[in-house]
Amino acid sequence: MSVYVIGHKNPDTDSICSAIGYAAYKTAAGLEAIPVRCGDVNKETQYALDYFNVEAPKYISRVEENQQVIQVDHNEAGQAVDGLEKAELLEIIDHHRFGGLKTAVPLFVHTEPVGCTATIVSNMFWANNVKMPKEIAGLLLSAILSDTVLYKSPTCTDKDKEAAERLADLAGVELKEYGLAMLKAGAGVGDLTPMQIAKTDSKPFSFGNYKALVSQISVTDTSEVLNIKADILAAMKEICDKEGYNLIMLMVTDIIDEATDLVYYGEPKQLIADAFKQDASGDYIHLPGVMSRKKQIVPPLTEAAEKY
Ligand SMILES: [Mn+2]
């Protein structure tokens, strides 16, 4: 039985492309590994897959008992594929905080505080002299450009840039030109419903005793989301009521202006006020320079929640 390499629920470009890349790396090393996904492929990722002519990983709704699994791009239980607790977890390759990791057996864990899982995967290929196919280079590059928002995110490190330059050479693309085209393909609300917008790239978190969902949509003009804010707030209320969240936040991130409008529903709003040091009694706040959920949204909320 093949080992599954899988990213988080609601997969982004890194979760899909690092799963494909790491499965290729493990296969070259003699393991029977295949990439899988536990959510839909988003517009940005589809652009990258089409550009480099690679099929999306197979969709699975859950993993069966005893299935061998390698997690990439996540480690928090709430973000993982259903059924993982009864599967056999072999490895974690990730670049996120540890959110309460507990395993039954020892496993191989490789995490680094870099901007993208694909950076770690690329360096594994190179450190072990594994030949990287051109299309894998293209997909790993896509993941780095996506997670770092073309280097603009504060999560971006020199390691990410070095890997990306090398990958762009291997893939035969002009880095900035390709990256901007890919980001634009994924940006904007397009024909998404307010419910789909509210759940774009969403990840669940616990901040103290509060259950929160933090979503993020990339845009080139925030007004296309803010103009339909009332409908999005109604969708957020529905998600809170049905799924038991206390708070839902949607990061509307302008990839050109490098700022985020944080739209939110639920309680306590004071948690948002404390975290971002501004009045949060309305339904959104403007956060200049904020692009990263991991580095600029989750840590201040985690810290503010310690007082509750
Ligand atoms: Mn990532």
Image: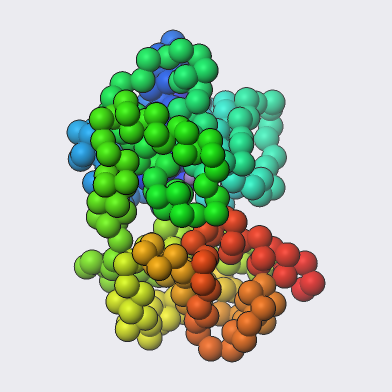
Q: Can residue 108 be seen here? A: yes
Q: What percent of the width, then of the height, locates residue 20?
A: 37, 31
**Where is residue 208, by image quadrant?**
bottom right
Q: Residue furthest right?
A: 307
Q: Residue at x 50, y 14 (%)?
A: 128
Residue closer to the observer: 294 or 204: 294
Residue closer to the observer: 62 or 162: 162
**Where is residue 229, by image quadrant?**
bottom left
Left or right of residue 60, residue 178 in this image: left
Q: What is the quadrant of the C terminus in the image?
A: bottom right
Q: Residue at x 29, y 29 (%)?
A: 171
- As displayed, is residue 91 above or below residue 10? above
Left or right of residue 41, residue 26 in this image: right
- As displayed, is residue 77 above or below residue 282? above
Q: Residue furthest bottom?
A: 281
Q: Residue at x 42, y 42 (%)?
A: 144
Q: Residue at x 26, y 47 (%)?
A: 177
Q: How many marks?
A: 0
Q: What percent of the width, then of the height, locates residue 213?
A: 53, 65
Q: What percent of the width, then of the height, locates residue 3?
A: 45, 24
Q: What is the quadrant of the N terminus in the image?
A: top left
Q: Can residue 58 be seen here? A: no
Residue closer to the observer: 179 or 245: 179
- As displayed, is residue 32 above or below residue 90? above
